Image (cartoon, helix red, strand yellow):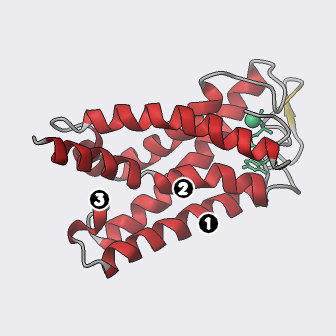
């Protein structure tokens, strides 16, 4: 592979994951109201906590899906082959839905684990806070589009794009949360 091909491969790996990156931030903006666990507890601790709401879930998921559609629309307009990494349009729609919904499912799974460990809503949980949504997105998209995940993030040298993506997410997560905190959208800078 040439340096250009490697750069392009890394860029595509980041690009197609964008629909999984937006929902968490969008959930902060849209969130509020009825919690997903309806305020219920399990063994004396909240199932998910007040930080996971239905409005956040649907607002966040829809934001990621709409952004994904816009991204594919841009690829379509540019007349680009293979819709810039999503493959066909039909598959792209499916992938975008899996990534957006999966990221928020992962986020809830993270909160579920935090509550079981006795970590209160909003309290720090290193690694879990940064990667719960990534794990959720990859889990769901791998269930429905295993071949696409393999060819985009594993096959040949494609694992390099996965490593770069995971490293980028670490810094992106820190940066976005600090911005959200400064803007007064988030209660904590993580
Ligand atoms: N949010 C929401 N619904 C979701 C996800 C997030 O309403 N499904 C909103 C909540 O207002 C939440 C904020 O986004 O407080 C930040 O999300 P996050 O950091 O994931 O939640 P925390 O409040 O930190 O709670 P937890 O400890 O459970 O992660
Ligand atoms: Mg948090």
Q: Is residue 189 left or right of residue 78?
A: right
Q: Quadrant of the N terminus?
A: top left
**In the image, farthest residue toward the bottom:** 77
- The answer to whether the residues at label 1 and label 2 have Cβ atoms under 8 Å apart is yes
* Label at residue 98: none
Q: Is residue 167 left or right of residue 47?
A: left
View quadrant of ligand 2: top right
Q: CA distance from mark 1 to mark 2?
A: 8 Å
Q: Quadrant of residue 50?
A: top right
Point out the tag, 3 or 1, that comes first from the N-terminus.
1
Q: Quadrant of residue 155?
A: top left
Q: Is residue 115 left or right of residue 110?
A: right
Q: CA distance from mark 3 to mark 2?
A: 16 Å
Q: Secondary structure at mark 1?
A: helix
- Position in image of residue 34 (x %, y %): 87, 55
Residue highlighted by disc 2: 100
What residue is rendered at 54% in x and 50% in y? 21
- Position in image of residue 53 (x %, y %): 79, 51
**In the image, farthest residue toward the top:** 117
Tell me if the residue at label 1 has its CB under 8 Å from ligand 1.
no
Residue highlighted by disc 3: 85
Q: CA distance from mark 3 to mark 1?
A: 21 Å
The one nearer the camera, 181 or 33, is: 181
Say above or below: 120 vs 100: above
Give the foreground label among 3 and 2: 3
The one nearer the camera, 145 or 171, is: 171
* Label at residue 62: 1
- Position in image of residue 22 (x %, y %): 59, 54
Task: Please rate how many residues cluster around mark 3, counting C-alpha atoms within 10 Å: few if below 14, some from 14 to 19, many from 20.
Answer: many
What residue is rendered at 81% in x and 49% in y? 183
- The answer to whether the residues at label 3 and label 2 have Cβ atoms under 8 Å apart is no
Task: Please rate how many residues cluster around mark 2, counting C-alpha atoms within 10 Å: few if below 14, some from 14 to 19, many from 20.
Answer: many
């Amino acid at each position: 592979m040439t340096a250009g091909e490697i750069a392009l491969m890394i860029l595509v790996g980041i690009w197609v994951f964008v629909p999984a990156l937006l929902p968490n931030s969008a959930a902060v903006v849209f969130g509020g109201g009825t919690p997903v666990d309806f305020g219920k507890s399990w063994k004396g601790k909240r199932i998910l906590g007040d930080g996971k709401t239905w409005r956040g879930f649907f607002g966040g998921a829809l934001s990621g899906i709409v952004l994904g559609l816009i991204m594919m629309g841009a690829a379509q307009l540019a007349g680009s082959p293979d819709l810039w990494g999503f493959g066909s349009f039909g598959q792209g729609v499916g992938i975008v839905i899996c990534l957006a919904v999966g990221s928020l499912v992962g986020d809830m799974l993270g909160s579920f684990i935090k509550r079981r460990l006795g970590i209160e809503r909003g309290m720090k949980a290193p690694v879990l806070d940064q990667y719960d949504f990534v794990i959720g997105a990859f889990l769901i998209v791998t269930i429905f589009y295993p071949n696409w995940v393999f060819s985009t993030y594993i096959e040949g040298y494609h694992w390099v794009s996965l490593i770069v993506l995971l490293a980028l997410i670490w810094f992106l997560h820190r940066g976005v949360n600090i911005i959200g905190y400064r803007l007064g959208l988030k209660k904590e800078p993580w």
